[in-house]
Amino acid sequence: MSKAATTPPAEELNHFEPSDYSPYRFFTAERWAEFRADTPLTLTEDEVSRLRSLNDPVDLDEVRRIYLSLSRLLYAHVEASRLLFDQRQQFLSLPEATKTPFIIGIAGSVAVGKSTTARVLKELLTRWSGKPKVDLVTTDGFLHPNAYLRSQNLMDKKGFPESYDVGAVLKFLSDIKAGRPNVKAPCYSHLTYDVIPDEYVEIDRPDILIFEGINVLQVRDLPEDGKIIPFVSDFFDFSIYIDAAEELIHQWYVARFMRLRETAFKNTESFFHRYSTISDDAAMAIAQGLWKNINLINLHDNILPTRPRANLILRKGPDHLIEQVALRKL
């Protein structure tokens, strides 16, 4: 059967509503906010302003509505994981050991606000009682260097699954889950739009690791012989997908591109500096082309199909704020 015959149209891909057969429970943002209970607000408006990405309007009200309840939910999952770990140690008659890090995966399209969500969650989680150590790593550093992508004619596929060093990602997460100290994650420069050679950040046995990237819930073809081949998401204890209607993500992507022309692209060392010197009309045409020919294809073929694999889906509305929460049933 051809791909055209099996791939649903865009409007069907974006259709995500409650049904009798859904594995999710759906909540409005207002209903979700009620689950905050007595979770304290530990962030200030200035801190939230520092944490949010360009063109992302998240503020303290959004933290109260969405993120405090989410923080409470994650706390419950972390505590349950610790309890299960202790019970398994007893079941297997193993000596006492330290619980390995709880890993949270965050996925979603470009320009949908993954980075803001990851940073806000990191700050909230570090302020739980007990002050857990929380680290945040993005998949950008695991992209193949531009030189390699050019040699393989993959520059126009940057951000697609094939543009990442999946082996390096799996080794990193495996080492983290094994509780190994000082695990290195490669660094990435958004200024030069490339991996920084021989530069790493060391992750040293955190209590919680947030791993954020557009394709972290991606799966691959299953082996015919039943060989065990891990997926990145196999290492996650909890996963979140940041969602929005396709036309909204399109608008946000183009708006961000045009805004960057007046900010980061002005830097002469920026990979995209050339876009700051052309006319608005020319820049708009380029932004629309990048969306249609690269990011939209990646969304349809690789990112959006992973949405049903998440434990929690945060659905954004036109104002870039969460309007619906879907939580997988237990």
Image: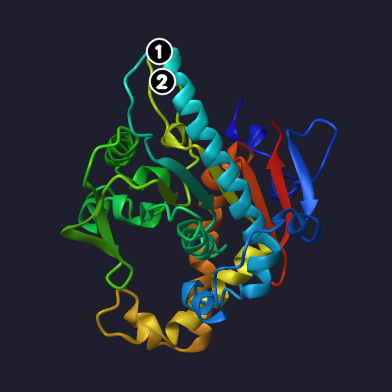
The residue drawn where x is 30% and y is 73% is 191
* 10 Å crowding of disc 1: few (<14), some (14-19), many (20+): few
Quadrant of image for the N terminus: top right
Q: Please, what secondary structure does the residue beneath circle 2 have?
A: helix
* 10 Å crowding of disc 2: few (<14), some (14-19), many (20+): some
The label on residue 12 is none
Quadrant of image for the C terminus: top right
Q: Please, what secondary structure does the residue beneath circle 1 have?
A: loop
The residue drawn where x is 81% and y is 30% is 21
The label on residue 89 is 2
Q: Nearer the viewer, residue 106 or 290?
A: 106
Q: Nearer the viewer, residue 287 or 200?
A: 200
The residue drawn where x is 48% and y is 22% is 87
Residue 205 in view here: yes
Q: Amino acid at mark 2?
A: Gln
Q: Nearer the viewer, residue 86 or 294?
A: 86
The residue sitting at the top extreme is 225
The quadrant where residue 140 appears? bottom left
Instruction: From the top left corner, tell me how far across and down residue 53 is, in percent.
Output: 49, 72
The quadrant where residue 307 appears? top right
Marks 2 and 1, how far apart at CA: 5 Å
Q: Which residue is mark 1?
A: 92
Instruction: From the top left corner, tell me how far across and down residue 225 is, in percent.
Output: 40, 10
Instruction: From the top left corner, tell me how far across and down residue 263 is, in percent.
Output: 41, 85
Q: Amino acid at mark 1?
A: Leu
Q: Is residue 296 left or right of residue 146?
A: right
> Does the CB distance between marks 2 and 1 fall below 8 Å?
yes
Q: Is residue 27 left or right of residue 267?
A: right
The residue sitting at the left extreme is 198
Instruction: From the top left corner, tell me how far across and down residue 60 is, in percent.
Output: 63, 74
Q: Is residue 69 left or right of residue 218?
A: right
